[in-house]
Image: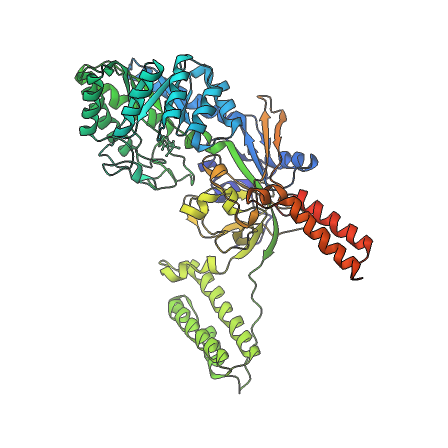
Amino acid sequence: MKTDSTAWSTKQSAEIYGINNWGAGYFSVSDNGEVIVHPHGNGTGVSLRKITDGLIDRGLDMPVLLRFSDILDSRIQQLHEGFGRAIEQFEYNGHYRGVYPIKVNQQQQVLEEIAAFGAAYHHGFEAGSKAELIAAISFMQDSEAYLVCNGYKDAEFVDLGLLAKKMGIQCVFVVESPSELELIIDRSKALDILPIIGVRLKLSTQASGHWNHSGGERSVFGLNPSQVCDLVDRLKEVDLLDCLKLLHYHVGSQIPNIRDIREAVVEACRVYIGLVNEGAPMGILDLGGGLAVDYDGSHADTPTSRNYGLDEYCAALIENLVSTLNEAEVAHPNIITESGRATVAYYSVLLFNILDQSRFEIHDLPTSLAADAHELLHNLIAVVNVLEAGNAQECYNDAFYYRDEIHQRFKRGAMTLRERALAGEIFWHIMTRISKLTTEMEYIPEELQKLPAMLADIYYGNFSLFQSLPDVWAIDQLFPIMPIHRLSEQPTREVVLSDITCDCDGMIDQFVGQHTTRDTLPLHNLTDEEYYLGVFLVGAYQETLGDLHNLLGDTNVATVEVSHAGKLKYTREIEGDSVSDVLSYVEYDLKRMVRRIRKMAEEAVHTDVITARDRRQIMETFENGMRGYTYFER
Ligand SMILES: Cc1ncc(COP(=O)(O)O)c(C=O)c1O
């Protein structure tokens, strides 16, 4: 990588990190080299660096999860406007009603914001458990919005939903398995409240992408066509067919290919028509989640991207509905989608500082070896002398062979520590030169492609992958990561990131590049100034899936609002977990721990190992530590 910073522009920074590809208009780079957030998706913006300084001034330490409530509002608005345009274009007669699947980010703040801002669009909720149902009921204030109940339901769940319906909430029970229907029938008779019944369909359509097992005939949830017919027969038997109003399917989260989306809606539409022909009133078609986020900005049919935009998604669904329903002369139902990821992903950014670095550095080689130096060392030096682009792979193989032979001999005591150290220096010198030579090659062999990652620096970030980015660890999810400042300087180091868990799984070595993924992230040299990185698009699924690996707890959280005139307001702060919080989560008895340390310290005073003043200092340090943040504090 070039080291001359003078010719570097912020435009080049925007390009190497791909921010204009994945930022969806919410993030950009300013002329003075800082990342700017545009929470309303246009014009006015505020520097993330400025926001970070404000947080530090207020005493909120890194890492911080930054939430933008305006981005949440903007996403809901865009979703409804997208469907609005498609409905008008294809002359669709039903309404669009979104529901937010609570599991995607269950924070009260998210529900409050969606209930308040979404009211103008009758945006409702999807609940998959009793806790989510209670959360949804307590925030539902709109009798035109839907509350869709998926997931396994017990009697208490059904009673809660029926009573919510009695209060005027449009609470729909989606039958996920045949046995659930009897429970709904029994409880509705017991409480004398007619239910709104929906049925989840197992489609034969299976989407590509990471979550494709949610769809297809072997999916875990939902009824196959024959079970759907049994459900209709049973409802007719108990005279409740009038309660069957909704058909639902969900082919999986993050569907990358628009063709799968089209196929699924047509298949579901046929079943919907079948149910209308069976005499069910119907009126609502719930197309599930799956609207994907373009995490790497490549606009491609890959698990971390999608080959369509929001308008295309809305148009594809509505167009297929109109043609299928019109052909069968069936009235257009209201449409629900359960978009979670696409609603909340952009809403949060994880900010953290870099604590330290382990630089990959090679030293100058000796110009010649002593005549009596070990033959294997001479062989390694010979590789250095003949290396060129045309024989790079051969030299790579030889270098590995001689290096491994030297390691073996060292283990047997046949070579000295200094000889082994010199072998290491020569080996890494060869690897570095080969890596540089790959830039001259038309075709780079697979092993040589991995060299930049092998030769990268390691930067240690003040965060826990397991707590804040669990999908990176669990499913190799890619999130855009970049510095939030110094973007008018050329980044001169190629880096992989490590968190502070000291766990080799706490490493990030896949990054979003210009139009592709990269094995290393270009970053700046560390200086005395604190260096901040942002991980973007982390609002969906990350916050509550995170765990307490190494007892690193929830991070500090801050919510900011930016007015249309660009005025910044810090609206909410939530302090992250303290050490005592995380210890109590894993059932430590904190009072007992303090008593034990005090007893130990007193024993030490008694035996003249420490003084009484030392004891006081020990207890103060211990108690301060318990109150402190679980992350690295400067
Ligand atoms: C039934 C159901 N609805 C909606 C969603 C949300 O999907 P997404 O976040 O991809 O929109 C999920 C998650 O996979 C789901 O299981």
Residue 75: quadrant of the picture: top left
Horizontal arrangement in the rendering, residue 330 relative to residue 544 (left or right): left
Nearer the observer, 556 or 158: 158
Q: Position of residue 466 (x, y in %)?
A: 50, 46
Nearer the observer, 253 or 279: 279
Work out whether 538 lies above or below 96: below
Residue drawn where x is 31% and y is 31% of the image: 250
Work out whether 63 lies above or below 199: below
Q: How many numbered marks have been drawn onto this rendered protein structure?
A: 0
Work out whether 563 lies above or below 592: above
Q: Position of residue 418 (x, y in %)?
A: 57, 78
* Residue 583 visible in the displayed image: yes
Residue 312: quadrant of the picture: top left
Colouring method of the image: rainbow
Q: Position of residue 423 (x, y in %)?
A: 51, 75
Horizontal arrangement in the rendering, residue 355 relative to residue 235 (left or right): right
Nearer the observer, 155 or 196: 155
Q: Position of residue 459 (x, y in %)?
A: 56, 53
Which quadrant of the frame does ligand 1 lie within? top left
* Residue 488 visible in the displayed image: no
Residue 246: quadrant of the picture: top left
